[in-house]
Image: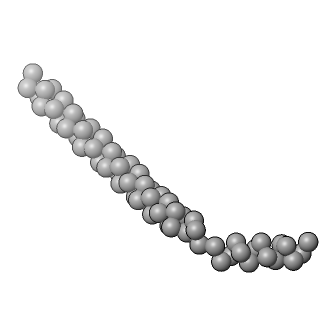
């Protein structure tokens, strides 16, 4: 039984068939994470800009009356 396990693990250790797929999956995960962080920061900046614009327009409207 132990010989079979040793043979199985040695064959599994040498097998490189799925290595490319794992590397591509890691690259896709890293790019996806970078996009999520970028979009999150960009959305916060857009919300802040929109808020400042609406406050500026409100102050113009209030001072004009």
Q: Quadrant of the N terminus?
A: bottom right
x%, y% of residue 29?
A: 48, 58
* Residue 52 to residue 3: above or below: above
The residue shown at (65%, 77%) is 14
Q: Nearer the viewer, residue 53 or 65?
A: 53
Question: Height in image: 62 above or below 39?
Answer: above
Q: Is residue 26 visible?
A: no
**Left or right of 41 on screen, residue 19:** right
Q: Looking at the image, which is closer to me, 18 or 31?
A: 18
User: Residue placed farthest to the right in the image?
Assistant: 1
Q: Identify the residue shown where x is 57% and y is 65%.
A: 18
Q: How many marks?
A: 0
Left or right of 51 on screen, residue 18? right
Could you tell me if residue 57 is visible in this image?
A: yes
Q: How is the image coloured?
A: one colour
Q: Quadrant of residue 5?
A: bottom right
Above or below residue 25? Residue 56 is above
Q: If the image is split into quadrants, where does the C terminus sit?
A: top left
x then y, percent, for residue 2: 89, 75
Q: Position of residue 49 (x, y in %)?
A: 24, 43
Q: Could you tell me residue 56's position as x and y percent?
A: 17, 36
**Which residue reaches farthest top?**
65
10 left or right of 33? Answer: right
């Amino acid at each position: 039984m132990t010989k079979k396990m040793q043979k199985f693990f040695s064959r599994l250790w040498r097998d490189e068939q799925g290595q490319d797929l794992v590397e591509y999956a890691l690259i896709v995960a890293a790019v996806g994470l970078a996009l999520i962080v970028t979009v999150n920061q960009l959305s916060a900046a857009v919300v802040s800009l929109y808020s400042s614009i609406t406050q500026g327009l409100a102050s113009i409207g209030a001072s004009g009356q």
